[in-house]
Image (cartoon, grey):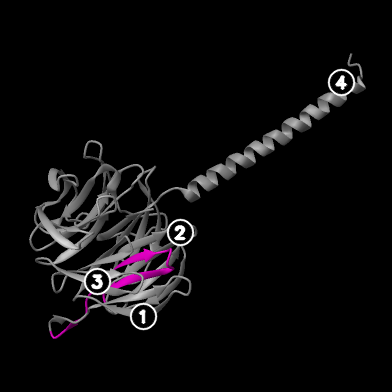
Amino acid sequence: MYHFNPSSDKEEGIMKKTNTILTMVFLFLLITFIYTSDAGAKKVYVANSGNNTVSVIDPAKNEVVMTIRTGVWPASIAVDPASKRAYIVNSNEGDSTISVVDTESYSEITKIKVGIGPMSIVLDPAAGIAYAADTEHMVEGKNVNKTLSVIDLKTNKVTGKIEVGVGPFDMKILDKKLYVSNSGDWTVSVLNTADRKILNTIKVVDTPLGIDVHPEKKKVYVAIHGKGQVTVIDAVNNKDVGSIPVGKAAWYIAVDAAKNRAYVTTREENKVSVIDTNTDKVIETIKVGKEPIGVAVDPESHRLYVANFGDVSVSVIDTTNNKVVNTIKLTPATDSTYSGSPWGIAVY
């Protein structure tokens, strides 16, 4: 027979309520943790030039989790994690815009009209501006473009133009200097970001394309497409200090400063050349997919991601042993679209 015990029953009731509350709090914290962890987790963004989309890859799963529709012929991407904005360069001459995308909802906020045929964008969040390279406008068989569009990141408006060399292709900022590879006249322009004036014009060789920097070593690395090499620039004196043979059709380059490595795609050889930035020599080549173009490195995990234009895939490389550990096919994503002809790639 059950005997009523006011004290015992009261304590039992309190315990039940306490356990219920603790369980609810735990579940709330767990859900919050999962949500915020996923929202803040890094993603790999791949510009699919062939079908006007960007594939979003979850690097933890090595799979496409979202497809973003863009303008015509997206070529490259830059992301500002602080503002949760992605800037996608739509390079088709008839489009020539930058799609601004919310990286939480993956919805387009606006499009920014820039110069004709843009190929790249670089962000300077501290200054509140971005630079878009107005790369190609052909008139009677001649490229007449030689400007950068200056964008106000608050208003998403172009506020001015800067004249550089012919066919500006790629850009990076180092120590308040903007380095621009000019594919049309085979030069690298060096600008002071404070007053946007040209400090130097460095003559290189046949068709400079991708560019990246090593902040600690004060070096700039430029992929020279026509010569299959990388030009090394001393960023202190802004002088060409040497070249590194890498292979046919050098395209883009990514520097992992912490590991003192630079990675260069050689499109015609289906390889990535690994450069030791201490010696500026190639120490290894990695076989990847067909026609690799874009390359990006995660500075925390040191995983390397390569966009393979020819077989519509992304190679994932473990840089501790320089082995391909995964190949992600850009097949139907969550909204049933197909990715095609991957070009630029970014990790944020």
Amino acid found under the numbered disc labelled 1: Gly
Q: Which mark is residue 199?
A: 3
Which is more N-terminal, label 1 or label 2? 2
Q: Secondary structure at mark 1?
A: strand
Q: CA distance from mark 2 to mark 3?
A: 35 Å
- Give the SS element for disc 2: loop
Label 2: which residue? 103
How far apart, in angstroms, are the residues tagged by discs 3 and 4?
Answer: 83 Å
Kindly identify the amino acid type of the residue bearing the numbered disc 2.
Thr
Of pointers 2 and 4, the one earlier in the residue sequence: 4
State the residue at coordinates (39%, 51%): 43
Label 4 vs label 1, nearer the camera: 1
Q: Is residue 122 above or below residue 320?
A: below
Q: Which residue is mark 4?
A: 8
Q: Which residues are magenta?
A: 117-140
Q: Position of residue 289 (x, y in %)?
A: 19, 49
